[in-house]
Image (tube, rainbow, N blue to C red):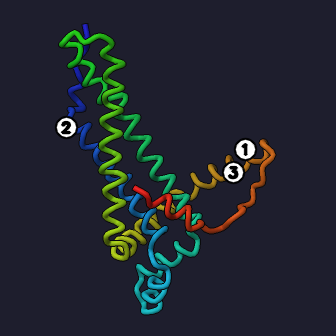
Amino acid sequence: MASGPDPSTPLASQLMLVLALIIINGFFVAAEISIISVNKNKIRILAEEGDKRAKTLLIMLNESNKYLGYIQTAITLAGFTAAAFAAVSMSEELRVYLELFKVPYSKELAIVLITIILSCVNLVLGVLYPKRLTLNHLGKVALALARPVYYISRLLKPMMFVVSKTVNLLLRITGQSTQRVEDEYSEDEVMSMLEV
């Protein structure tokens, strides 16, 4: 007989946690788009006028590849954590209810359904909406997110060091160069990242 959902983690709490992770994902998507798209000259002028947020953002823009790496790491962590938690916890909740109706392959079906639902919600709330919102208010969003992203990036430095060394090792093993060919994004790359 199937056991019921764990009463110590009610469905509402699980949904709140997954939603929080999706919002975190959206936060970093907005940060990524703002770094890629913001007008560097306008930010430089604000920094020269003494705006502390603009000074921080200018530091990030001058080392955009490094900070985009930190942001991508945070996006990956948030997305992976949300997916893993939903697959383990929320799919178990759904499995119990599917079994009440004698649905065959309820465990597998629950995982598939939760994955599809989570993907759709994450796509809308964690990617497309923050991307559009950022593009509509680019300067304000870029300045607002600059300092939080800067300090979060410092926390991610040890992880990024390990990741960078691992990637370089793989490149050497496969006979590839560990040096960057280009230090900036091309116009085509920027446009492809902004496509919705």
Q: Which mark is nearer the camera, 1 or 3?
A: 1
Amino acid under label 1?
Leu
Local crowd at mark 2 within 10 Å, few (<14), some, or many (≥20)? Answer: few
Identify residue type, mark 3. Answer: Lys
Q: Mark 2 highlights which residue? A: 12
- Name the spot of residue 90 as percent of width and height, x first: 29, 30
Q: Quadrant of residue 122?
A: top left
Question: Residue at 78% across / 42% down in the picture?
Answer: 173
Label 1, label 3: how far apart the Cα atoms are? 9 Å
Residue at point 30%, 35% (across, down): 117
Q: How many marks?
A: 3
Q: Residues within 10 Å of mark 3 (few under 14, many from 20)?
A: few
| Amino acid type at mark 2 | Ala
Residue that label 1 marks? 170
Classify the position of the C terminus by image quarter: bottom left
| Residue 132 vertical placement versus 73 (above, below) | below
Which residue matches tag 3?
A: 165
* Alpha carbons under labels 2 and 1: distance apart: 42 Å
Percent coordinates x, y for residue 156 in the rendering: 52, 56
Whole-number angstrom distance, CA of label 2 to CA of label 3: 40 Å
Q: Secondary structure at mark 1?
A: helix
The foreground one among 182 and 6 is 182
For the N terminus, give its image quadrant.
top left
Check disc 1: other Cα within 10 Å, few if <14, some if 14-19, many if 20+. Answer: few
Q: Quadrant of residue 139?
A: bottom left
User: What residue lies at 59% left-to-right and 64% top-to-bottom?
Assistant: 65
Dot placed on the residue nearer the N-terminal end, 2 or 3:
2
Q: Secondary structure at mark 3?
A: helix
